[in-house]
Amino acid sequence: MHRTLPNQTEHLESNRSRRGLIRDMVAFVVAVAASAGITAAAIQLIRSPSRGLPYHDDFANNDASEWSAYDGNWNVHSGVMTNESNERGAKLVAGSPYWTDYALDADISLNNAGDAGVLTRVSDAEPGVDSYSGLYGGLRVRDETLVFGVAHHGWDEDGRAPMPQPILPNVWYHIRMEVRGCHVHLSASQENSDHKTQIDISLPQCPKHGKIGLRSYDSGGQWKNIRVTALP
Amino acid sequence: MMRLRASLANNAGTRSENPAMNSDNKQLVRLILAAALGGAVGSLAVLVPSVRTEPSRPMIAFIPRTTGANFAEDMHRGAEAAAERAGYQLYWNAPTRADDVDRQIRIAQKAVDNGAKALILAPTNPWGVTTLIDSLTRQKIPVVIVQTESPVPTGPYVTSIVPDQAEFGRIAAERIAAVTGGSGQVAVIGLDRGKPETLARAQSFIAAMKAHPEIDVVAQSSGSIQTLEDEQSTREILNSYPDLKALFAVSADAAQSALLVLQDTKPDRKIPVVGCDRDWFLADDLLNGTLDSLVTADGYRIGYLAVDAALNGTRGRPLQQPSPVGAALLTRQGIVDEENR
């Protein structure tokens, strides 16, 4: 009959305990690596600049649930988003905060004096006039121009180009803003017109990523056919 | 997991009878704990750096009447420069309506709740913000009023940095005397009780006009933040006084409305408009000759001095007494010279 001596028992127990410890450590390291990898992949997926692109909102079924309003009186009807208020700097924001280089297309019509347009690379939005970081391009009735500027909770106008004809209320204009790095190309044309008014500008500094938005200043406005496409 | 449960269940009844199996269970639990701990550490190691934000600098809030307009942005630049120099962050925001005192109070209060060490305020209506100012001074938060006189007595926690409003009126009176040749009918437009600086400017203008007895100030009309109301008041004056030789607009809004009405109703008749404050598109109007001149104060200097005063307050020193900022006349030539520079 085989008998285990006390010394042998202790030795076996000690070996077993050491093996257990090594196994626990290996499990710990493997789990650290696996969860770090999975978390990093998830973050990368969520923050991907191409996530959700191309984006299109034609406000079908009067649905605007993706949009967040910061001031203004917004309502959607028959595929058109309208801001009835002539507050200064009313905003409506949607999209991914991680979009970087993209083109935003929209059709816009103004209600009266003031200006209305689109926003790109929006972040830190809150109620208030220029209370966001981002780029604004729009039509301004007061001096009949296409205007572009950068907002960083303040306003820096960086370019304006005269429209060939007076900006008419309740007439549709197509506006397109392309942002690639700190290079911005903004264009606007009246519906059924081939003439494009353009601003092409390279900024020394700019917001690097952000959502899209609709904005009006001292004027109500209407927007439709919002499209965002990634730029290579 | 199923295997673990089965193993635990099988061994539950025999725990005291089989020490080896008991030890196996313990090791299994330890293994699971190690893996779970590893998973948590791995996730946190990636998540924490990705959501960590830079420690923020101390903040001063500047709440103007509106933003995006020239005068406000001049103040903004001056305030930013002073705040940057002192290592402070500037919170800058305004209500979307320049007459929305409730929203302005909410924005100011929120900024203070978020940790602003001092508040600089251009009240949309000075009488509407007295409770806010009283409440902040009770909390020993310095308040600096800009653009218009403080509606409450100044003291260790309240001061104002405002243009010399009387000088606005005097300068405008001299300019109008010069462009009218020292005689004829003139009118003052844009008086707004919600903006006491407009009343002060009109008052000193009328007082200064006493030195020109041939000039008759025939009307003073009220102003409004609503452009259409402003335009209507100006239209009535132009209709009532067809021989009017000049207009003194005591605010930028009033000047802008006057230009729109003149463009609309009297394109063939030249009525010089002397405006106040370099705001909106008035510099463009000066350049193209539709506006005669502007009486202006240096917005950059006001913004800079306001932050400087507020910083003194945050360091526990009593705020300095209000000191007026001088005004100057800006003509087309002045704008041309500026652009050349």
Image (cartoon, helix red, strand yellow):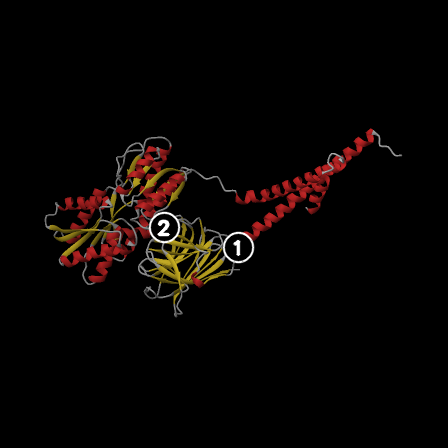
**Residue underneath mark 2:** A129
Q: Is residue A63 left or right of residue B293?
A: right
Above or below for A115 versus A2: below
Q: Position of residue A83 (x, y in %)?
A: 36, 58
Above or below, A107 relative to B132: below
Q: Mark 1 points at which residue?
A: A49
For the N terminus of chain A, the image quarter is top right
What's the amino acid at mark 1? Pro
The tag on residue B125 is: none
Nearer-the-camera pick, B55 or A29: A29
- Answer few, some or many: residues within 10 Å of disc 1's Cα (few below 14, many 20 plus, some between 14 and 19): some
The quarter of the picture where residue B11 lies is: top right
Residue A111 appears in the rendering? yes
Three-letter residue code for mark 2: Val
> Could one spot residue B64 in this view of the protein?
no
**What residue appears at the point 32 percent right and 52 percent down from the top-left corner?**
B339
Label 1: chain letter: A
Residue found at the very far top of the displayed protein: A6
Residue that extends furthest to the right in the rendered view of this protein: A1
- Nearer the observer, B301 or B222: B222
Q: How many neighbours does mark 2 have within 10 angstroms: few (below 14), some (14-19), or many (20 or more)?
A: many
Q: Residue drawn 62% across and 46% down?
A: A35
Q: Is mark 2 on a helix, strand or loop?
A: loop
Q: Identify the residue at horizontal 67%, vertical 41% (top origin).
A: B32
Furthest-front residue in view? B13
Disc 1 is placed on an element classified as loop
Position of A70 compared to B146: left or right?
A: right
> Residue A210 versus residue A193: which sits nearer the camera?
A210
- C-alpha separation, residue under disc 2 versus residue under disc 1: 28 Å
Front-lying residue, A184 or B237: B237
